[in-house]
């Protein structure tokens, strides 16, 4: 059975030819399957932050979806294997460099393959187009995974965190998403970033004007925000800024 969709998450950015070339491969190989852009502005080269983003934005995708995720600073090296995962009914294709660690760690049902498929042409620097896109198309058509089944055991480092207490993404409004699932902390918590404390508010309209706050964003993550303002600029927050527990 064909996949309901193929979803893309990369750090390629929206400029240049990269996203278009990946989508062109998919358009040729599986023209009948819709391709959606989840995001192409994942933090460049930041595998850990992207792993937490990936887990948060793919939970709502329909079962059977194929997620092609590429944040791959080690492309062309032997430091990571190309992999396929099936986690809780969804497929994931991309580099085995840790980007799927959060998805795998939280999965109730998990299967893993090391990709052994190789295309006739494989550039050293663009596996997203030349390797991962064709493999995603194979999976989306309902064909068997083109790889060797592998045990997930030992693939995720023992020190990989359950929650990431730092900023992992800043949107165009200056809201700063973290790698913390809001369900796992109390709304009584006061968080601290760069010496500023942020109390909880349920929605923007209930926050104190002019004061930063944290809330549960639409993907379930703790997000730092400023009502009708840019929190990242106001409080000098960047991707990687540490989040601390403030004084109660």
Image: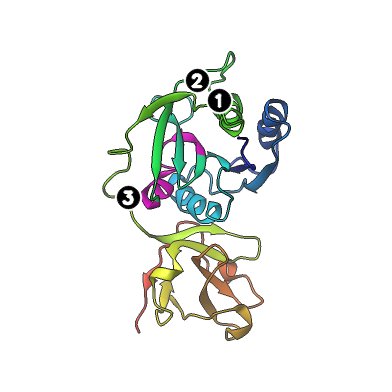
Magenta-highlighted residues: 92-106
- Measured as percent of width and height from the top left, residue 43 is found at 53, 49
Quadrant hosting residue 141: top right
Residue 160: image tag: 3
Quarter-of-image position of residue 176:
bottom right
Counting other residues with Cα less than 10 Å from the Cα at mark 1, is it few (<14), some (14-19), or many (20 or more)? many
* Colour option used: rainbow
Q: Secondary structure at mark 3?
A: loop
Above or below: residue 177 compared with residue 108: below
Give 100 or 78, whichever is nearer the viewer. 100
Q: Residue at x 28, y 39 (%)?
A: 153
Q: Residue furthest front?
A: 1
Whole-number angstrom distance, CA of label 3 to CA of label 1: 27 Å
Q: Earlier in the sequence, mark 3 or mark 1?
A: 1
Residue 186: percent from the left, percent from the top?
39, 77
Residue holding disc 1: 131
Q: Confirm whether residue 102 shows in the render.
A: yes
Return the residue at label 2.
117
Q: Is 128 left or right of 189, judged from the image as shown?
A: right
Marks 3 and 2, the one that precedes in the sequence:
2
Q: CA distance from mark 1 to mark 2?
A: 8 Å
Q: Say which quadrant the C terminus sits in.
A: bottom left
């Amino acid at each position: 059975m064909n996949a309901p969709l193929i979803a893309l998450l990369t750090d390629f950015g929206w400029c240049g030819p990269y996203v278009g070339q990946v989508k062109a491969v998919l358009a040729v190989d599986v023209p009948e399957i819709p391709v959606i852009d989840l995001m192409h502005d994942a933090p460049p080269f930041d595998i850990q932050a992207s792993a937490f983003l990936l887990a948060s934005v793919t939970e709502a995708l329909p079962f059977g979806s194929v997620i092609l995720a590429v944040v791959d600073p080690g492309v062309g090296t032997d430091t990571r294997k190309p992999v396929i995962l099936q986690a809780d009914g969804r497929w994931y294709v991309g580099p085995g460099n840790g980007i799927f660690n959060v998805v795998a760690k939280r999965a109730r049902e998990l299967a893993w393959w090391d990709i052994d498929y190789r295309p006739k042409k494989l550039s050293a620097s663009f596996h997203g187009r030349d390797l991962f896109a064709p493999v995603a198309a194979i999976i989306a058509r309902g064909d068997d995974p083109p790889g060797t089944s592998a045990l997930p055991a030992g693939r995720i480092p023992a020190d990989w965190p359950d929650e990431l207490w730092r900023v992992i993404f800043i949107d165009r409004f200056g809201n700063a998403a973290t790698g913390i699932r809001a369900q796992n902390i109390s709304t009584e918590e006061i968080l601290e970033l760069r010496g500023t404390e942020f109390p909880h508010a349920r929605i923007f309209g209930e926050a104190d004007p002019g004061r930063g706050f944290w809330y549960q964003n639409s993907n379930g993550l703790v997000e730092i925000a400023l009502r009708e303002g840019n929190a990242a600029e106001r409080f000098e927050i960047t991707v990687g800024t540490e989040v601390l527990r403030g004084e109660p």
